[in-house]
Amino acid sequence: MLHTCPVDSLLLNWLRDETRDWRPSIVGVFREHAAHSDWPLTANSPGDLREQLTTRGHLLPLPSEPAALANVMEIELRRHLTRRAAELDGGQIEEGTERSYPDLEFHGEMFGGGPQAIDIKCARRKLSASGTPTGGLNNRIALYTGNTYFLWPQLKFSGILRPFDEYADHVSVVVLYTYDASLPERIKDVSVVVHETWRIASRSRASATREYIGSVSRIGAIEAGDGEFATAEEFYAYWRAPSIGWKRSPEAERLLRQALEAQDT
């Protein structure tokens, strides 16, 4: 499906500018105690420092588990965007927690108003048996939790900074990377894509066992913002339809009951 060109916005353009050349700089885990005695350590460049820390046993590889790697990259990119936004006049930014939605909230006229929800996602390229990229993702990106704040956008759930419908827009910042076990940082060929979230959505769940809305799986479609819906309205109508059959959420039932009780008082 080919969409019309994505709607430009001040925030989308700013995010694309700030992430175009961004690459993670965390290359390992620092180990304080190592078996050497040749102090002091003097380095002439970041590369020289990295080599010395590695050879002296102070720098250990990053974990290979995908969620752990994603967490490292998300934290660094969040700090980068927060720092850059703080340098601007008229822009406000609020951070969520590592487990909340969204990762960042943007406000202010320079970003086109607000609040606007920014969620950072990391996606690993799928490799063939020979180690070459296939053009697809290793796993679909989980865009939203379908049976809680997304399904009931007027309710304030735990783990979300405000009700879903209070956001003027929802944007995904997707970090694409190739996994390489031979590197201490485990990642290479990093690129960043920024789109309104609905533009990269599919009609498939991200997981067969959990209540997540999934992205399209072809990297070219993610880069182009060419998901499986022609409009945002079509996306929301599809995923909020009763036929989707989301599992019941105990928290949603509790919040709905509280809302009904408040109307009766």
Image: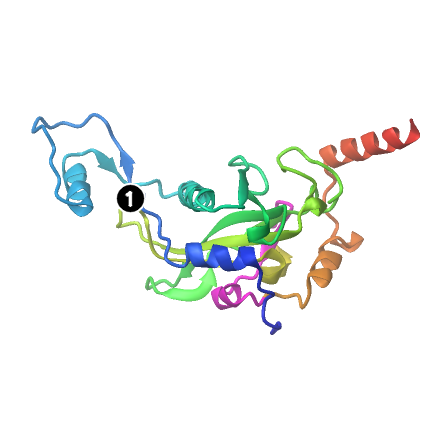
Q: Compared with residue 26, is residue 219 higher up or lower down, i.e. above or below? A: below
Q: In this view, does 144 lie to the left or right of 242?
A: left
Provide the secondary structure element on which disc 1 rests.
loop
Residue 27 inside the magenta-drawn segment: no
Q: Name which residue type carries label 1.
A: Val
x and y, in percent, of residue 250 in the image: 73, 33
Look at the image and give the residue range highlighted in magenta. Answer: 206-226
Q: Nearer the viewer, residue 209 or 160?
A: 160
What residue appears at the point 62 percent right and 73 percent down from the top-left corner?
A: 4
Q: Compared with residue 224, is residue 257 higher up or lower down, i.e. above or below? A: above
- Quadrant hosting residue 231: bottom right
Q: Compared with residue 6, is residue 240 higher up or lower down, i.e. above or below? A: above
- Can you identify the residue that label 1 sits on? 27
x and y, in percent, of residue 103 in the image: 54, 42
Q: In this view, does 16 lie to the left or right of 169?
A: left
Q: Can residue 124 be seen in this view?
A: no
Q: Is residue 58 visible?
A: yes
What residue appears at the point 75 percent right and 58 percent down from the top-left corner?
A: 237
What residue appears at the point 32 percent right and 41 percent down from the top-left corner?
A: 62
What residue appears at the point 43 percent right and 46 percent down from the top-left corner?
A: 84
